[in-house]
Image (cartoon, rainbow, N blue to C red):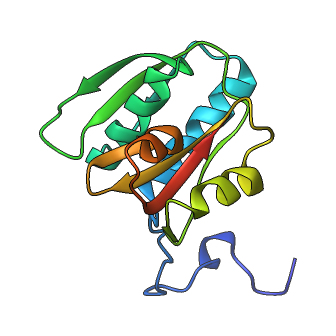
């Protein structure tokens, strides 16, 4: 130990403490899901909640990648409990949300997804948030939000 050093004098008083800020709630949500899935958990609590998170999870639920969603309204940011069924290998956010034309959907799918047989891109369009196959059927482009497979 240094001469004259007391353990109580470790930090200077009034030093600004760095606080981590949340950049993307959707990214945190999908990371929590993937990590819980890797650990073999049956359900995962996601907070805070947002409309985009709910829509993204509903697309995943529609394709059978996750089970029930339980939305908890705590009069604050809200929480969601997601039931996991062990089908998710990876899911992620694409940031920034690049523009995708109808013609560019196929190319983007081949770049991001492991195969043509499975996996989904999630796009936000003028008709709402949907997967890339539904966007192609409706012949509408949009911005890419994320992917899951």
Q: Residue at x 80, y 41 (%)?
A: 114
Report the side of 52 relative to 6 (left or right): left
Instruction: Give percent across and percent down for residue 136.
Output: 48, 46
Outermost residue toward the left in this view: 75
Q: Residue at x 61, y 49 (%)?
A: 92
Instruction: Give percent across and percent down for residue 69.
Output: 36, 20
Q: Quadrant of the N terminus?
A: bottom right
Report the side of 133 relative to 46 (left or right): right
- For residue 94, what is the image quadrant? bottom right
Q: Residue at x 70, y 38 (%)?
A: 90
Q: Quadrant of the C terminus?
A: top right
Report the side of 110 relative to 104 (left or right): right
Q: Is residue 143 above or below residue 109?
A: below
Report the side of 67 relative to 1 (left or right): left
Visible in this render: residue 51?
A: yes
Q: Is residue 79 above or below residue 145?
A: above
- For residue 104, what is the image quadrant? bottom right
């Amino acid at each position: 130990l240094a001469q004259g050093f007391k353990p109580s004098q470790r930090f200077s008083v009034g030093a600004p403490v760095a606080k981590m800020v949340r950049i993307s709630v959707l990214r945190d949500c999908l990371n929590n899901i993937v990590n819980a899935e890797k650990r073999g958990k049956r359900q995962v609590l996601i907070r805070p909640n947002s409309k985009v998170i709910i829509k993204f999870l509903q697309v995943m639920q529609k394709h059978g990648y996750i089970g029930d969603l339980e939305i908890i309204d705590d009069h604050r940011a809200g929480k969601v409990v997601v039931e996991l069924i062990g089908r998710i290998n990876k899911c992620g956010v694409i940031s920034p949300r690049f523009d995708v034309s109808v013609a560019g959907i196929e190319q983007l799918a081949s770049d991001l997804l492991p195969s043509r047989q499975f996996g989904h891109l999630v796009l936000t369009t003028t008709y709402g948030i949907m997967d890339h196959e539904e966007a192609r059927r409706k012949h509408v482009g949009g911005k890419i939000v994320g992917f899951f497979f």
